[in-house]
Amino acid sequence: MRKPALSLLAAVGISLLAGPAFSADTIKIGNIVAASGYLKGAAEPSLAAFDIAVAEINAAGGINGKQIELIRFDTGSDPKQASVAARQMIEDDKVIAILGPFSSGETRIAMTTAERLGALMIPTAASAPGLVDGAKWTWRLTEDETKQFSRLLSAIKAAGLPSATADIVYVSDDVVANTAGTKLYGPLMEKAGIKVGEPIPVQQKSFDMAAQAAQIVSAKPDLVAVAALPDAASKIIKELRRQGYQGRIIGSQIFSDPYVVDLFGPEGEGALMVAGFWKGSSAKSAAFDANLLAELAKRGNTHKKGAHHSDAQAYDGVYLLKQVMEAAGVTGDPAKLQAEREAILAKMEGVSFSGVVGDNVCFAGHDAELPGYSIEIKNGQWTKFAEAPADKCN
């Protein structure tokens, strides 16, 4: 069911609203989010990131002198609802562009609607390999899982960590986890010279992996690659440790949120993962991290320990839209809506963008080229293990 569109005042709070009140003359931007359902834990903080960026831009005068009006739709983590949201926003709400959906599963469905109806869509955290290949209207300010996991494996090898053998555990009923576990991790580890066992599935809805963990513990691999969202990853890791597994737990971007330090507990010590955001990369990155945590605390979320790369991508997505809309001379005039949608799309070609995820970010095809930060849980802290610069665009 569609949630009511939120005004910025309701979404952000009076403390963040420094600009003038909305008039009917606004720039309407759709915002497809997962504020409920199984994605809520990972996705909800990005709402605050969107809201902070909108409030900052509106306080500074908006886009071409007009305030941004976010029109928000909660999918409930249901990909079908993401498609409903895209259609309603483009056809009924007359938004000029869409930020979101959150996940690859939602984006895979919703982008078909955006492509058919002709409106720019920038997903929040959709990182499934090849997701936007051949797309016209869908662009990702997200780094592909293939590239990021390869960077982690290179960092492991460079550090000389034991990595001759590995097993894979994945959540079979999640699109990204399933893809990573069955098609991504194995080939990449084998390419890196790691002997890999047959991927082991577990299900999100009926979670019990005692037997699977016993199988892994008896094999004694150097690494266990986990493909799961944070909550499921925590269950997998704790069961492995309970049964005595002593090797390294590794993962890609899927569960690399700073709050997993507490979620995993002592069992997560030594876990390695990769992320597209590091708060220490620049002063503006550090400021965003601090501002996000402060705003989340106001909203009652005190368990977050730092910004996830999806939070940073949400924040930067608003500023990327601002940049291309200003370059396109967007007015928000309903009579010019489709022409202005086309103008925005044209300005995405060859765009270079600087934000909290990095400076001079370019796009190879419709995928952003972002840096990669290998992260280790060390002494109960979210620490940088290694980093790789963003690849150059052709």
Image (tube, helix red, strand yellow):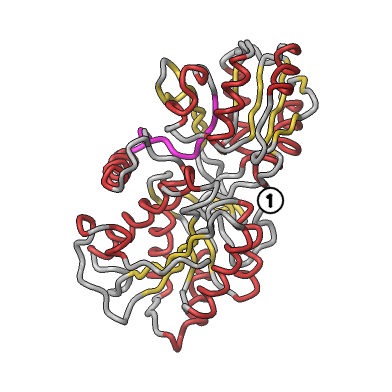
| Span of residues in magenta | 272-282
Residue pointed to by mark 1 = 130
In the rendered image, the residue lying farthest to the right is 198
Q: Is residue 281 magenta?
A: yes
Would you say 180 lies left or right of 98 here? right
* Above or below: residue 133 compared with residue 371: below
Residue occupying the point 46% across, 53% down: 35
> Residue at position x 61%, y 76% from top?
117
Q: Between residue 296 and residue 391, name the one nearer to us.
A: 296
**Kind of residue sitting beneath label 1:** Gly
Residue in front for this viewpoint, 177 or 320 = 177
Q: For residue 185, which quarter of the picture? A: top right
Residue ID at (51%, 21%):
268
Circle 1: element type: loop
Quadrant of res 240: top right
Mark 1 packing: few (<14 Cα in 10 Å), some, or many (20+)?
few
Q: Quadrant of residue 68?
A: bottom left
Number of callouts in the render? 1
Q: Is 246 a magenta residue?
A: no
Horizontal and vertical percent position of residue 195? 77, 20
Q: Nearer the viewer, residue 253 or 65?
A: 253
In the image, residue 27 above or below residue 53: below
Locate residue 355, reporting x and y percent.
38, 49
Q: Position of residue 111 (x, y in %)?
A: 62, 64
Image position, residue 328 (x, y; %)? 43, 73
Relative to 319, 110 lies left or right: right
Q: Is residue 198 left or right of residue 248?
A: right
